[in-house]
Amino acid sequence: MGSRFMNNLNSLQYFVPELFLTAAILVIIIADLLLKKEKKVVTAYLTAASLVVTFFLVFQQYGHPFTSLFEGMIVLDSFAVFFKILTAFSTLIIVFISLPSFRVQSEYYVLLLIVTLGMFLMVEVNDLLMIILAMEMVGVISYVLAGYNKKNVKSNEASLKYVLFGAASTGVMAFGFSYVYGVTGHTNLYAIQDAIVSTHPQPLPLFVAFLMVLTGLGYKIAMVPFHFWVPDVYEGAPTPVTAFFSVGPKAAGIALFIRFLITVVSHPYQGIATEFAQNIEIQAPMLLAVLAVATMTLGNVSALRQKNIKRMLGYSAIAHVGYMLMALVVFNEEGITAVMFYMIVYLFMNFGAFWIVETMTPALGSEDIAAYKGLGYRAPFIAVAMGVFMFSLTGIPPMAGFIGKVYLFAAVIKQQWYILAILGVLNSVVSLYYYIYVVKVMFLEQIDEPQPIKVGLYYNILTWVLLIPTLVMGLYWSPVIKFTSKSFGFFLGK
């Protein structure tokens, strides 16, 4: 007992970012109680400052060797640090995107920090019980954020659907975990892998468990057929919240998905035909390939007929999950590095698109794509920026999205998944239609007597912050690729 206590106590020295975030949450709650309403904007600045400090605390952990914390419940490695940096930065950007709409809602910023803490745990969990707790920590707060505009009927509907689908998927996943525990007798991911390899359990329970776990993780990353919540939630939630859902929790979900697949199902240096896949009598890569094609195809085809730009971006987000799943099919370093690079690129171009929506909706009075008619003449810089983000999401050079897709497709082609690569390219061509349609409406359709839209300095600065990386990473991306490659080194540390 004493040894276990000392081990847990020793683990706290590697848990500084999470402890700091917890302290920041408490400080902001207390500040909310003490400050007058007109001064509560201070809590937004405190949140931003807390995230900046957290970002640097996490960055100091980069390159840290594989370390097991809290009796193996959590692991610290470069892979976890990469996604902690990504999620912390995404929350920081969302704070700035939210400022015009949520200046004095202190509880909103507290919720963002709690979700960030949950995402940190999601990317470093190494135990089935901790997976449930971390996912629920993110999920429950996300339900509240989705319905934050309580006077808006669509926001309430979004929250309710999110709760129902979330509860169902979590229940199914937990049931799958119970099968895994029943078969292996362990909750630690590495212990589960060792038990499967050494004992060769019956295939049927593992097959059922695998499908159930896939349900829960697939819901978190909006993978078909567990995507039904996305369009309504993205349309009904406040725009900053929608932007946050499209990157932060999704990145954490993908990190957890990768860790589970590679820790329990396989190890990238042991080959694709894994012991787990053989035991459940299914080739995991082929199953992922089918899901990737279904996800990108359904997302793109559904986006074609959307008139609401947030709903269109919601279906687009589903399609981008399909592209990333495509690279996971190859189950090697190149594929996972490509996914990690694409997440960085996706952060900037997707946040950029949602930021333009948040900026223009009050002036245009609608979220319909038709409302953007003639925007190129009314707010030229904003329209050009939106065009860049649309081109990047499509994957047109020289935008960062093109480089991201090149790495995804290259990883697939190198492992001779030619049909999968062709289907991915065809889906990118399909996506060109609805992305370019937005550009067409802005620049090729005019309105009578267009009135210029004045855009404040704050809006222009944040637009540049998101626009510059989208352009620069399309021309000079090697440092980012090196960063993602080093972050993948955790597999060698077991």
Image: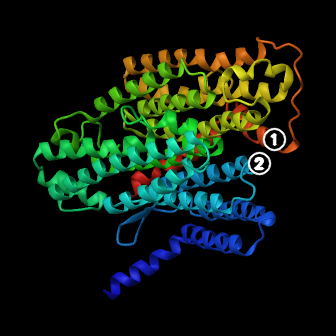
How far from the left and from the top, in percent, is residue 6?
Answer: 40, 84
Could you tell me residue 255's position as x and y percent?
A: 45, 48
What residue did someone put label 1 on? Answer: 459
Work out whether 427 lies above or below 287.
above
**Type of amino acid at the residue the image marks with label 2:** Pro
Instruction: Identify the residue shown where x is 89% and y is 16%.
Output: 449
Q: Can residue 338 be seen?
A: no
Q: Give the colouring mode of the picture.
A: rainbow
User: Can I make out residue 415 in this image?
Assistant: yes
Quadrant where the C terminus sits is bottom left
The residue under label 2 is 100
Choose between 487 and 316: the one closer to the eye: 316
Front one among 371 and 317: 371
Quadrant of image for the N terminus: bottom left
Going by the picture, which residue comes out furthest to the bottom?
2
Is the residue under label 1 in contact with that under label 2 (CB below 8 Å)? yes
The percent position of residue 304, horizontal first and vertical second, equals 54, 18
Q: Residue at x 40, y 59 (%)?
A: 125
Q: Which residue does the image show at 80% across and 22% down from the upper left?
A: 375
Q: Amino acid at mark 1?
A: Tyr
Q: Nearer the viewer, residue 365 or 318?
A: 365
Instruction: Quadrant for residue 374, please give it.
Output: top right
